[in-house]
Amino acid sequence: METLRRNIRDMDFTILGVLFLLAVYSFVAILAATHGKTTDGAPAGVMFRQGLFEIVGWVVMTVVMLYDYRSLRKVYWWVVAGAIFLLLVVYVMPREHGAHSWIPLGQLSFEPSEVAKLAIIVGMAAFMANVDESELPDYSMRRVWPVFVIFLVPFLLTLKEPALGQALVMVALALTMFTLFGKRSHFLFIIMLTLGVVIGLSAVAVLFPKESTDFIQSVLIKHHILKSYQAYRIITWLNPGAYPLSYGYNIRLSQIAVGSGQVFGEGLFSGIATKGNWIPNQWTDYIFTAIGEEFGFVGSSMLILLFLVLIYRLVRVAATSQDTFGTYIIAGVIGMLSFQVFENIGMDMYLSPSTGITLPFISYGGSSLVVDYIAIGLTLSVALRRKKLRFN
């Protein structure tokens, strides 16, 4: 405890300030998206529930921050095993919205894939740190293959649910961590090659939307590589005019709502699309549309600026940490949050396909919000202990 008092100056109060402002944004946006609506599927007492989730999130974040994250390094296999067990439990639960993604807890539900993301971060960070700090570091495949198991098992179970959005987040955080790990091995080449292939395929898809659409329909759907609704979400991204009243309905109305906000927005409770309940599930996956429509470019830009400041401060903590394990943890958190922000906002503006990913700290939800706070709690724990102790 005395050590914590001496190092309290290392607390990043900017991160806490940003989180508070994001919480304010969340309350206003959810209020706008649910104001005066009783038949659009929003849960009863949505604002009260979100407030409760916020309180739980801040409490859990504080507890995690005070906890010495380095203790997780000794039990990381148990952390990963626990997450895998929870991912298996969902398969004995009834389907919800067509997927085995939730574990019912009375009036609430719990999404194990959210916890699995943190488990992957902790597991990969511990293994990578052990390799880096070994007496004779060996980055050959025969030495580092377990790190792929730590990622692949939760990833495949999540993809099978199916929860493509969550699975993509896992890929993003893993690639971010491998980028640091890869600087010391041949994995950097594999990462760059993978990114090059993804960028190349995306460019081809954009330049040749008809041919890409035909390929998706004839190969990816026919051979069950993707679920039909997942494939059609990609198709509507490549060809916005396709299926305007079904698969492309949400994304088209999202773009209309964001664009109608123009510079300063239409005002709180004044957005036509938001007030008219045009966009399904606006308080969760499509929460950015309410912000874009009612607060315009200025309000949306301020929200994006807050996310940029948050990511920048996380990078600063990682850069000043003298613990390899802590640095890898923060790298995973950065990859997780950055991808979710880009994907959620991007899908509302046709920059990316719709995947059903929540906007961190903004969208309504218990599992995602609390897990995001736990992730920040881990980074603040690293911040408090980023300097080597004088006496151990």
Image (spheres, helix red, strand yellow):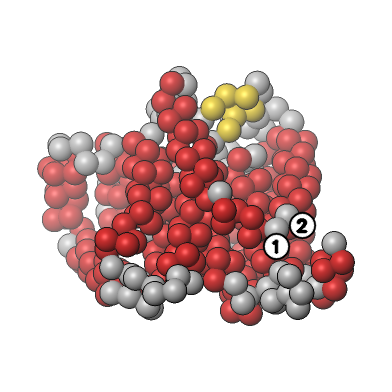
Q: Quadrant of residue 42?
A: top right
Observer-nearest of 127 and 35: 127
Q: Residues within 10 Å of mark 1 (few under 14, many from 20)?
A: many
Q: Are marks 2 and 1 in contact (CB under 8 Å)?
A: yes
Residue at the location (43% across, 67% down)? 131
Residue 113 position in % (x across, y down) = 49, 41
Name the residue beneath numbered marker 2: 66
Q: Name the secondary structure under disc 2.
A: helix
Residue at the location (27% across, 54% down)? 239
In the rendered image, the vertical position of residue 371 relative to residue 294, given as above or below: above
Q: Is residue 176 something that shows in the picture? A: no
Q: Quadrant of residue 154?
A: top left
Observer-nearest of 41 and 6: 6
Kindly identify which numbered label has been placed on residue 381. 1
Residue at the location (52% across, 50% down)? 76
Observer-nearest of 263 and 123: 123
Residue 382 position in % (x across, y down) = 67, 66
At label 1, which amino acid type do we have? Ser
Horizontal arrangement in the rendering, residue 90 relative to residue 195 (left or right): right
Kindly identify which numbered label has been placed on residue 23. none
Q: Name the secondary structure under disc 1.
A: helix
Q: Is residue 26 something that shows in the picture? A: yes
At label 2, which amino acid type do we have? Leu
